Image (spheres, rainbow, N blue to C red):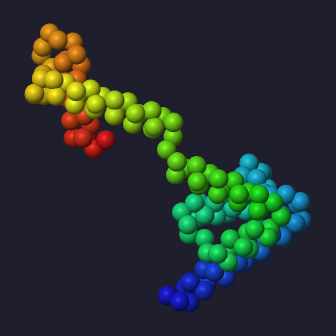
């Protein structure tokens, strides 16, 4: 297992050296849309490094190696910003949670006033709306949402 890990590190280091040389020779980072096979391969490799970075699977030494490649420090800052942004809830998620909390508060108020859960098959519009919301929550829970 140890020799396999060493082999993977050496393979990574070799690819990073190839990447660094390509960037220095071409004065820029490789593009995934390139027609040149080597450029496209290196662009896919760096995209894979971004995924590893996002999941915290790059070693500190690998991160340092990448930072020393011209243009990569800036690229890695974008990776970091993207990773941090992905941990923050979206405005849609916040609004959805606020809407859910509001409906839950309406249900609580209704139960406090009437001493029971609302029923769907009634004339009272408010009771029917709150009862339908409960049913939607039950179905969502049953479906694993």
Residue plotted at (69% across, 53% down): 78
Residue at the spot 87% in from the left edge and 66% down from the top edge: 24
In the displayed image of the protein, which residue is found farthest to the front? 113
Find the residue positioned furthest to the bottom: 3
Nearest to the observer: residue 61 or residue 123:
123
87 vs 107, left or right, is right
When asked about the image quadrant of residue 15, the answer is: bottom right
Q: For the view shown, which residue lies furthest in the top direction?
A: 123
Residue 82 coordinates in the image, percent (x, y): 62, 51
Position of the C terminus, as image quadrant, is top left
- Is residue 86 found left or right of 68 in the rendered image? left
Horizontal and vertical percent for residue 129?
Answer: 24, 19
Closer-to-camera residue (38/46):
46
In this rendering, is residue 35 above or below 115?
below
Q: In the visual, does 134 lie left or right of 39?
A: left
**68 in relation to 43, above or below:** below
Could you tell whether 10 is left or right of 72 in the image?
left
Most foreground residue, 138 or 20: 138
Q: Is residue 134 above or below residue 62?
A: above
Q: Residue at x 39, y 36 (%)?
A: 97
Q: Residue at x 76, y 53 (%)?
A: 31
Tag count = 0
* Among the 4 quarters of the image, the one containing residue 134: top left
Q: Is residue 76 above or below residue 120?
A: below
- Counting from the top left corner in percent of width and height, residue 58 is at 60, 71
The answer to whether residue 61 shows anywhere in this view is: yes
Residue 136 drawn at (x, y percent): 25, 30
Q: Is residue 40 visible?
A: no
């Amino acid at each position: 297992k140890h020799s396999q890990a060493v082999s993977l590190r050496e393979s990574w280091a070799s690819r990073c050296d190839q990447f660094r040389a390509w960037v220095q020779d071409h004065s820029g980072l490789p593009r995934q849309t390139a027609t040149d096979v080597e450029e496209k391969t290196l662009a896919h490799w760096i995209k894979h490094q971004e995924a590893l970075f996002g999941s915290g699977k790059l070693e500190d030494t690998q991160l340092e190696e990448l930072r020393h490649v011209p243009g990569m420090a800036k690229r890695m800052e974008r990776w970091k910003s993207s990773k941090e942004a992905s941990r923050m809830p979206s405005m849609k998620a916040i609004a959805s949670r606020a809407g859910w909390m509001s409906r839950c508060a309406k249900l609580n108020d209704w139960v406090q006033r009437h001493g029971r859960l609302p029923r769907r098959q009634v004339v009272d519009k408010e009771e029917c709306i709150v009862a339908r919301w409960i049913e939607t929550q039950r179905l969502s829970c049953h479906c694993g949402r």
